[in-house]
Amino acid sequence: MVRNPAGFWKRLAAYLLDGLIVGVPIALIGYVITNSWENNWFTSAANIVYSIVVPAVWSGYTVGKKLLGVRIAKVNGGKVGIGTMFLRSVVGGLVYVATFGVALVISAIMVAAREDKRSIHDFIAGTYVTTEKPA
């Protein structure tokens, strides 16, 4: 059951905060380790691990989401885990890449227009983003 869904702007702001607060330092560390900005395996791996592990162990929060008071939750009321976050981040990301970004644009429209504010990657993983605190 979807309760208190977070809208497009809060979700986008949380994503941008994650990029600044977590993504930039990861990219800098990746550059130091690999001596390359392009095809940087460390940065890619660290970002994937962050997007899967942090919400799974921190009640659906990432750093950006925590700062804005939103979190990822399962539609069925369960806790998000590694498998759920893998589906949401990796499988959802593959859908966006496979459609050359068309599905990403559709997802943004879905979050803006749908009452439950769920995107394609939310449907894949059975999740939504909410302003409700964990139980």
Image (cartoon, helix red, strand yellow):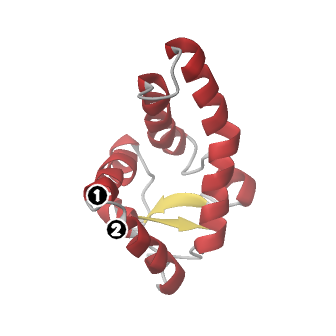
Q: CA distance from mark 1 to mark 2?
A: 7 Å
Task: Count residues near mark 1 (Cα–Cα under 10 Å), then give few for <14, some for 14-19, many for 20+.
Answer: some
Q: Which residue is mark 1?
A: 95
Disc 2: CA contacts within 10 A as few (<14), some (14-19) or many (>=20): some
Q: Quadrant of residue 63?
A: top right
Q: From what the image shows, is residue 73 above or below residue 28?
A: below
- Image-based side of 52 in relation to 86, left or right: right
For residue 51, the mark is none
Q: Which residue is mark 2?
A: 103
User: Percent position (x, y) of residue 51?
Assistant: 49, 42
Going by the numbered disc 1, the residue's amino acid type is: Val
- Note whether 18 is above or below 23 in the view shown: below
Residue 135 visible somewhere in the drawing: no
Which x, y percent locates residue 124?
Answer: 30, 62
Q: Residue at x 55, y 22 (%)?
A: 30
Using the image as rendered, state which of residue 36 and residue 52 is in the foreground: 36
Residue drawn at the location 69% of the way across and 50% of the way down: 17
- Quarter of the image with the N terminus in it: bottom left
Residue drawn at the location 31% of the way across and 60% of the way down = 100
Q: Nearer the viewer, residue 72 or 23?
A: 23
Q: Amino acid at mark 2?
A: Ala
